[in-house]
Image (cartoon, grey):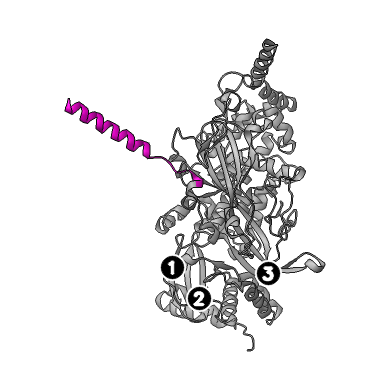
Amino acid sequence: MKKIFFIIMVFFTIQLSADKVELKYPLTNVVETTQWPLIMKEFEITTKLGHCGTGMKYSLGLKAHMIEFVGYYERSDKPLNFIFVGASLDANPVKANTPYESNDNGDTPKTQVTNSHFIKLPLLGMIFKKKLAFWCLQTGVIEIPYLSEFDMTYKHDYMGMKMIPQMVSMFSPDTLISGVFDCAATETAAVLYGNTEADNMSYNEFEKYSNKNSAMDKASENNNSMSRTDKIKHGTRDIVNGIRNSIYYVDGCNGFSPVGGYQDGNDPIVEGHNDFHGISNILQGASLVTNNEVFKKQSNFSFLPPQGSNKAPSPVDTMCRPAKFAMPIPSQFGLQEVYPVIGKLKEMGQDGISTSTAKNVPGSEGVVFAVWERRDYFAFAYFCPN
Amino acid sequence: MLKKILLITISTISLFAFNPDKYSYMINDHIDSNGTAKNIESLNKQFKKINNNVNYDFAKDFKQKYTNKFKGLTYEQAKIYINEFYRENDFLTKEESMLLLDYVFKVRNYTSKYANNFILYFFTETVPKSSISNILLSVSALQDEGINLNIKEYLTGPADNLQNYLFGWNDFIEKYPLKYQKNITDNFHLKFDPRFFKVYEIKKAPAMAFAHCQSLLPTPKTCKIDFLIRGDTSLLTFFDKISQIDKKYLPYKKILEAKNIYEVEK
């Protein structure tokens, strides 16, 4: 009898201790989950002069670049489930989560529509406000400008297509081939910003990885018409980002930009990345017609083609203040996984399969990403966003 | 009355919730009208011919194209895709598209294969501007000779008078002739990263390091610092000291000796 009692007690203690082990939600652990060193890594200020405003508002500034944490983007199977803070409203799942199968022949995989939220949280701006004037942080309060549960276009492709005619008109096999450029440019941008898998390696490992010889290496060695330093001087990053942003209908290496929230349910992280492309497009578009100005253009890039001339001009000058812009800007945003596993920043459309994907916890409630936004601006003269 | 309401709700739910495919069919109609669905099928066959190992699958259903990925393509694979499938248009010809691809892969190759050489300069606001600009001009002299060298300047931290300090820099640069002004501004990249000061125990500024990094944005983890000199030295003396240890840096020293670095009158 004592033995049985002992076994039961042990069983219960294991159960109790198992209950205690749970993942921390990103907002309750914001210091540890967010990749704060990015701020130091990307911030840069130069002595290149510029000016903003006219008349009495005329002011001089210096060209600068920065990145800041602007909020969370989350994706969950359960409707109205806010994983970023660990709160659920237990909504009726009948309409909100509709798994369905594609039509003919039956050889297509099962597909699923999950629920996506974007939570605006300019945390650093909330803390520092206007004290760090040169940094010009976004200020404001916590708000949820996008809830897919209340977006009809997210659940029904036919309606979704009507919302994004500029995308749908480009969906064809011919345009899909341009995804080769977009993917290559995205991967290159990741190398330039130092957001590759190689970044996780120690330096010796990196040297082994980078010494692999390929046909391209030999080709480039033979053709040394332009030295690398020249390329950097001519704004390599601008042109690479220009290619990414010009091919706006392709989300880097993840294929076409999604219509609504339709995904095949294979990899929640890659799908999350792809979904954010669609949602950023909707939010950029919404800033044109509504007062809800969540995403605007605030980074510099030059549009295609770089052939002949060094670069085409940036479409809208946003060195003094952000501007409304109808298309998604992949080079302006980066996603960093914060739940269920803490990952590193990845460019929009960057190769989804990584070590963090392998670590993905099956059966978890969903995925949460920290959204990082870049800005090119004239420091000390910029019209700081509220 | 209740029955009617119930009937309406059930019918609407069944329309929107249980039969969402009704709308997805419409996409297929849209494709067929353009004749692109047939193209996809033929493309699918051709793609499979090129590379059996690649899992790019142009399936019948258009939606499945979202999962198509071009990630990890080598230069040669990408070249085949463009050669075979890129159709010429007014926006970008095939030749131009190949050049574009060349360019993108070349940039990636350079940045990932060859480690980026960096001069990391650590300083405070009290360090004279002339000694910093001397280093910036020396770096630009090396760059003009085709040497891969970048420079980043790290200030100990942003001070209250940062605005005055930086505009003071602008006034200082104006003392130089016009051709040197550009060389200084092109290499002036001010950054704040206290991690470097902590990791390399830099308690007194200025200090100068020669590092090679994985990307164009140095961090203590992804950069390997080979040499670190503490104190106010010029780049010439820095490479002079280094080349005594490693002969690889002797050309750097010779270039700097041959070129006169312009100095402003005090």
Give the residue at mark 3: A48
Residue name at image x 61 percent, y 70 percent: B187
Report the residue at 71% width, 47% height from top: A293
The residues bearing labels 1 and 2 have C-alpha atoms spaced at a distance of: 32 Å
Q: CA distance from mark 2 to mark 3?
A: 31 Å
Residue on which the image places disc 1: B198
Given residues B108 and A67, the one toward you in this image is: A67
**Disc 1 element:** helix
Q: Nearer the viewer, residue A370 or B22?
A: A370
What's under tag 1, amino acid-wise? Lys
The residue that label 2 is drawn on is B251
Residue B50 x %, y %? 56, 35
Tell me the kind of residue under disc 2.
Pro
Which SS class for mark 2?
helix
Q: State the residue lying farthest toward the front.
A: B1
Q: What subunit carries mark 1?
A: B
**Residue A123 visible somewhere in the drawing:** yes
- Where does the image place residue A244, in percent across and percent down from the top left? 65, 48
Q: Which residues are magenta?
A: A1-27
Q: Nearer the viewer, mark 1 or mark 2?
A: 1
Q: Position of residue A123 (x, y in %)?
A: 57, 53
